[in-house]
Image (cartoon, rainbow, N blue to C red):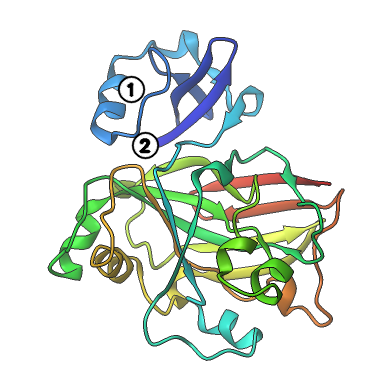
């Protein structure tokens, strides 16, 4: 299933996207993320007479995560383009829930920004509470689905202003998610997803999750040793090479730039940069 959330005159509504590209809103207002409940509501939703064309809906992010756990330098080619070695253990940092916007929403360049950058990523949506998992073998049983993410970053804030990376990762609008969540049963192997990003029509990232240093199962197991993962939490799993800081010369986003972010099965984001 493809699970999404739309803005309507009556507020946020959960919905599903049919194979024919029609959006079926679910009964009632949007609810906290619960995959079983979403399936139940989809089964009882009105038929095609209430469906809306996908291009006509006002897309919101498909969920409001309780927390967003991000993984740094998780592709060897991305680490190399920044002159860094591949880490021995996953590098973790957080994004606040209020950074989340939808797949067609604007990205706001923060005041004082010099180096706003892009990072296409595979997002993992947690479906079952995970704490101190005993093995990687059980980790994927705790995954509800996958979502396209863009870990927008301000490199000057992140790397040149001292302290934690978080100050370069948490400006409002710095975590576009969606357009939808694709349930895990329709993904198959999460380590075989092609993903990429264009800036003003020029392809700058084109990679595969096959090249992750730490795969999805390892990350879910690993992170559960340090914090409890709850349904609706998101793990953003790192980005392949091709970020702005890795260009020669470096290239960063400016107001008016347009991003197209995509991944196999997970749709596309189309984001306009604004000051």
Helix, strand or loop under label 1: helix
**Quadrant containing the N terminus in the rendered view:** top left
The residue positioned 24% from the left and 58% from the top of the image is: 140
Toward the left, the furthest residue is 134
Q: Tally the marks.
A: 2
Circle 2: is it few (<14), some (14-19), or many (20+) Cα within 10 Å?
Answer: some
Taking the image as shown, residue 50 lies to the left or right of residue 153, namely left
Q: CA distance from mark 1 to mark 2?
A: 10 Å
Taking the image as shown, residue 167 lies to the left or right of residue 191, namely right
Residue 73, percent from left and from top? 52, 77
Label 1–label 2 contact, CB within 8 A: yes
Residue 153, percent from left and from top? 65, 62
Residue 99, percent from left and from top? 58, 46
Mark linked to residue 1:
2
Decide: is 138 above or below 25. below
The residue positioned 69% from the left and 72% from the top of the image is: 161
Helix, strand or loop under label 2: loop
Mark linked to residue 166:
none
Decide: is 83 above or below 260. below
The residue positioned 73% from the left and 41% from the top of the image is: 106
Q: Where is mark 1, residue-wise?
A: 42
The residue positioned 42% from the left and 66% from the top of the image is: 192
Residue 264, percent from left and from top? 51, 55
- Where residue 228 sits, quadrant-wise, is bottom left
Circle 1: is it few (<14), some (14-19), or many (20+) Cα within 10 Å?
Answer: many
Q: Quick one: label 1 or label 2, which is nearer the N terminus?
A: 2
């Amino acid at each position: 299933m493809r699970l999404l959330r739309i803005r309507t005159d009556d507020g946020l509504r959960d919905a599903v996207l049919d194979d024919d590209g029609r959006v079926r809103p679910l009964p009632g207002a949007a609810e906290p993320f619960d995959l079983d409940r979403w399936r139940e509501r989809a089964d009882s939703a009105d038929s095609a007479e209430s469906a809306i064309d996908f291009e006509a809906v006002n897309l919101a992010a498909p969920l409001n995560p309780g927390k967003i756990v991000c993984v740094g330098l998780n592709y060897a080619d991305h680490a190399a383009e920044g002159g860094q070695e591949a880490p021995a253990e996953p590098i973790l940092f957080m994004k606040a829930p209020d950074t989340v916007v939808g797949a067609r929403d604007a990205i706001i360049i923060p005041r004082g920004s010099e180096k706003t950058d892009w990072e296409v990523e595979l997002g993992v949506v947690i479906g079952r509470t995970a704490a101190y998992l005993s093995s990687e073998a059980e980790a994927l049983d705790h995954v509800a689905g996958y979502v396209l993410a863009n870990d927008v970053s301000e490199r000057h804030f992140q790397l040149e202003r001292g302290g934690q990376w978080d100050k370069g990762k948490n400006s409002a609008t710095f975590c576009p998610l969606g357009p939808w969540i694709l349930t895990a049963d329709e993904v198959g192997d999460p380590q075989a997803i092609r993903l990429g990003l264009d800036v003003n029509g020029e392809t700058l990232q084109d990679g595969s999750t096959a090249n992750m240093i730490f795969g999805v199962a390892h990350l879910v197991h690993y992170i559960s040793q340090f914090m409890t993962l709850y349904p609706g939490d998101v793990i953003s799993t790192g980005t392949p090479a091709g970020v702005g800081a890795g260009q020669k010369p470096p290239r960063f986003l400016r107001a008016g730039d347009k991003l197209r972010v995509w991944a196999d099965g997970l749709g596309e984001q189309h984001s306009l940069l604004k000051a």
